[in-house]
Image (tube, grey):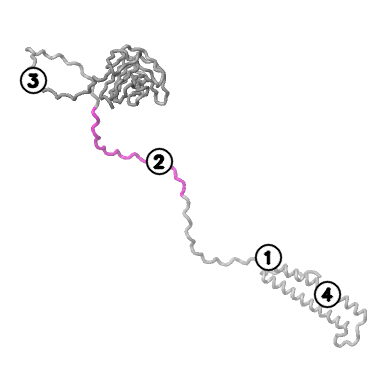
Amino acid sequence: MSMPTFPKNDPPLSREGSLNEIIASIAAEELSLSHILNTQGENLQYVLGTLPGLDEAASQDEVLRVNQSVKDTLSGIIEQQMMLSSKLGAALKAPTVPGPAGPAGPAGPTGPAGAAGATGADGPTGPAGAAGATGADGPTGPAGAVGAAGPTGAAGPRGVTAEGEARNGATGPTGATGPTGATGPNPTAAAAFAANTQGPDINVPSYSGVAIPLPDDQVMSADITANSENTVFQVNKKGVYLLSYRVNLTKPAQVGTKLMINNMARTTSSVIPAAPTASFENQYVHLMNAGETLQLKLCAAPLPGLSPKAQTVTLAGASLSIILLKEGS
């Protein structure tokens, strides 16, 4: 069975119009098929002997022929139905032909303002402006400091010698007698003085020091004695003593002095300078027991952050005084 053809329409039909035309064509073909089916139904009535008005039964050949005709008809109707279904599906899937554009709608309301844009880049630097007018003078500043004294001027000419005889003035009256001073300690009970005036070289090996011999100008009471080298002095009477010493070198050296009591240094009696020194002196009061000894020593003094350094110095002079201030404890 051939496919039906559709006449061309000018102007073109709309989608809805085309569908209506196709559906009408399919309906007409369906109607035609129904007529065919009715005809085959009458043939079956004839073969079965149920057709009104017929008394004669159909022969066997007629039955076979009608049977074959019904089968062929049904087969063709089935194919036709499938084709009609395909046509209807294709018609329903046909693309929509857009219609003409409608009139423009009214303008919508104004939308909200957009966010502020980013700050633009700085523009190029403008040309320099003209120089401003000169400002008024400021107030006068304070007076400056007095300058340094200038050089001494040249000596002036000698003045004229005065005439006449110069005379001394009259002698003034004698001043009043001052008050009597306080009574000093009585050192006569036990006292000693010893010195070194020879100026020997002394090797100072370490911080432990070396004793200074004091063989000169010795004045000692019976209660104070010295050893044969004149480096150790012993007190034989218990009491409070005033101990003082002085040491001078020919030039500054990095050394110090200390007074040893029973071979122990007393911090209050030591002089340990931080820089090279040539003169040392100290005095302090100390309670000594009978039989205790004294030594005056030179010792190597350390520089800050450094160890003491052994060295040789030349002694210009040294002295030691031992005075008993108070006997007993």
Q: Is residue 124 magenta?
A: yes
Question: Badges 3 and 1: C-beta atoms under 8 Å apart?
Answer: no
The residue identified by callout 2 is 127
Q: Is residue 164 magenta?
A: no
Label 2: element kind: loop
Percent across and percent down for residue 64 are 91, 77
Cα distance in 3D space between marks 2 and 3: 94 Å
The residue identified by callout 3 is 173
Looking at this rendering, what residue extends furthest in the right direction? 60
Say which label, 4 or 3, has the lower sequence index.
4
Label 3: element kind: loop
Q: Can the viewer see residue 250 in this picture?
A: no
Residue 79 drawn above or below residue 327: below
Q: Amino acid at mark 1?
A: Pro
Cα distance in 3D space between marks 1 and 2: 69 Å
Q: Residues within 10 Å of mark 4 (few under 14, many from 20)?
A: some
Q: Which residues are magenta?
A: 119-146
Cα distance in 3D space between marks 4 and 2: 102 Å
Q: Can the viewer see residue 127 in this picture?
A: yes
Question: Badges 1 and 2: C-beta atoms under 8 Å apart?
Answer: no
Say which quarter of the image contains residue 235: top left
Question: Badges 4 and 3: C-beta atoms under 8 Å apart?
Answer: no
Q: Nearer the viewer, residue 46 or 328?
A: 328
Residue drawn at 78 percent across, 72 percent down: 81
Cα distance in 3D space between marks 4 and 3: 181 Å
Say which label, 4 or 2, has the lower sequence index.
4
Direction from residue 159 to residue 59 in the image, left or right = right
The residue identified by callout 1 is 95
Q: Could you tell me which quadrant the N terminus lies in?
A: bottom right
